[in-house]
Image (spheres, grey):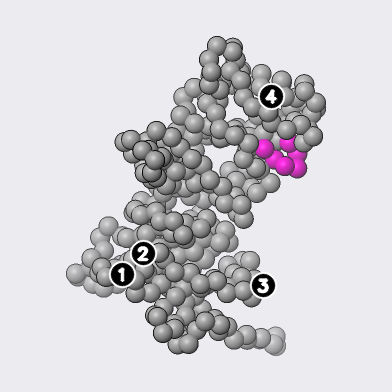
Amino acid sequence: MPVNVFTTLDDPLATQGTFVTGINGAGQIVGFYGDANGGHGFLRSSSGTFTTLDDPLATQGTEALGINNMGQIVGDYRDANGTHGFLLSGGTYFTLDDPLATQGTEAIGINAAGQIVGIYGDASDPDHGFLEVTGPNPPPPAGTTADMILRHGADGLYEIYDIGNNAFLAANFLGQVGTDFQFAGLGGFNGSDTTDMLLRNVNTGQFEVYDIANNQLTGAAPLGAVGTDWQLGGFAVDPPSASTASMGDSGQAAQLVQAMASFGGGAADTSNTVPLGAETSQQTFLTTPQHA
């Protein structure tokens, strides 16, 4: 019969108990603990380090309840208006309120696809289960004049921020790309898209273009590989008749690949599959992005 080994886990800041609620495949553990100021969520790393998680909107406590293999965490927080679910991903907290909830929402579990389960309450019953499935991102709000794309280095999650009048107007998830692909630049490589993102594999020199329209990825394609001893110097139009980078069709993109390959890296290789994960878009009732 196997010997079961139990290890006690007490958050070092806890004075009123520690509760362990979730673990992922990497051995990261989430839960919550109590002290004189109330309840706080925590993340325990696989090496044993505890990190306190307090939703920035919480005034009456935070509980971390579930974590997936990408390190995304769900739970709930409390304020003067009741209980709200939250998603913590890429360092950003997002509030989750089921649209039918009148007596609170709690997010309890999240899987690798970013689907979230939990409970909400209403006037007829305090406990209804819910399944939240990711939906498309909303288009940029009125007044958007520019976009900023951020990458979370630990897991390759990308987010897009709509900017207007010197302020963030909205934030949405774009997706997840393997961490061996690094950001190389933005441009208009496909005439039907508002913005395109170029990534490059640091190990192979492979370039990938990701088409972005209305705050979401609409497609991805390999451009080709160029030796890693060659660094990207910039973009130019073809034909050179405008001051902004633009490539209207796949033929023009192919010319870029051929030009870069001829500069010193070897033949273009378009055999790689696109490493885009299915992870995440704005949640259907995920309404309030906040900054950690």
Q: Is residue 2 left or right of residue 147?
A: right
Residue 172, percent across and down?
43, 47
Disc 2 residue type (three-letter): Leu
The magenta span reads 200-205
Q: Are marks 3 and 1 in contact (CB under 8 Å)?
A: no
Q: Earlier in the sequence, mark 3 or mark 2?
A: 3
Mark 4 lies on residue: 257
Secondary structure beneath label 4: helix
Amino acid type of the residue that numbered disc 4 sits on in the rendered structure? Val
Q: Secondary structure at mark 3?
A: loop
Q: Nearer the viewer, mark 4 or mark 2?
A: 2
Q: Position of residue 281 (x, y in %)?
A: 45, 47
Q: Indicate the amino acid at tag 3.
A: Ser
The quarter of the displayed image where residue 115 is located: bottom left
Tag 1 secondary structure: strand
Quote the CA–CA distance across marks 4 and 1.
Answer: 53 Å
Q: Earlier in the sequence, mark 4 or mark 1?
A: 1
Question: At x 48% / y 69%, what residue is drawn?
Answer: 53
Q: Which label's residue is closer to the chain start, 4 or 2?
A: 2
Kindly report the distance in space between the C-alpha atoms of the residues bearing marks 3 and 2: 29 Å
Q: Which residue position is annotated with label 1?
A: 79
**The residue under label 1 is which amino acid type?**
Asp
